[in-house]
Structure formats: C-alpha cells, structure tokens
Image (tube, grey):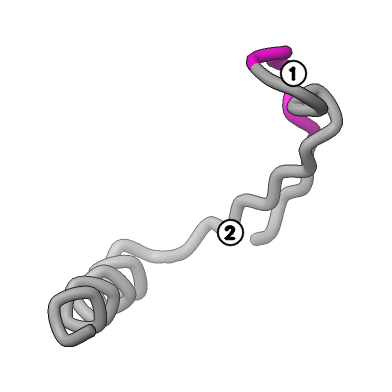
Amino acid sequence: GVFYGQCSEICGVNHGFMPIVVEAVSLEDYLIWLKNKINFDFNV
C-alpha cells in the first residue's frame, strides 16, 4: 500500500512541513526496482 505522512523532525528550514510518501511492495518488486535503479545510476 501507499502511506502518506509529514516529517516530524525540525532538522532544517521547512523540514517540519515536508510531506512523506512510503510505498510498501513485495520483496520481489523491491529487488527488481533496486536492480533497475543500480543499472540506471551506473549507465548515466
């Protein structure tokens, strides 16, 4: 699922108002995303 929140740490200017989005996925989907992310970063 997708979860929305608000930063609760005041660690910088306006960080207390920073929105947060977390998407929970299966381990398989995460590993596919990670592999694609690593390949993209190395090919740039």
Residue at mark 1: 8
| Residue 26 percent location from the top left of the image | 39, 65
Q: What is the chief secondary structure element of the magenta stretch?
A: loop
Q: Which residue is drawn at 72% across and 13% down?
A: 10
Which of discs 1 and 2 lies nearer the camera? The answer is 1
Q: Is 7 part of what is drawn in magenta?
A: yes
Q: Which amino acid does label 1 sit on?
A: Ser
For the C terminus, the quadrant is bottom left
Q: Name the residue under label 2.
A: 23
Q: Nearer the viewer, residue 26 or 42?
A: 42
Indicate whether residue 42 is drawn in magenta.
Answer: no
Disc 2 element: strand
Are circles 1 and 2 on residues that touch, CB within 8 Å? no
Which residue is depicted at the point 33% across and 75% down?
33
**Quadrant (top left, top right, bottom left, bottom right) of the N terminus:** bottom right
Mark 1 or mark 2: whose residue is earlier in sequence: 1
Image quadrant assignment for residue 32: bottom left
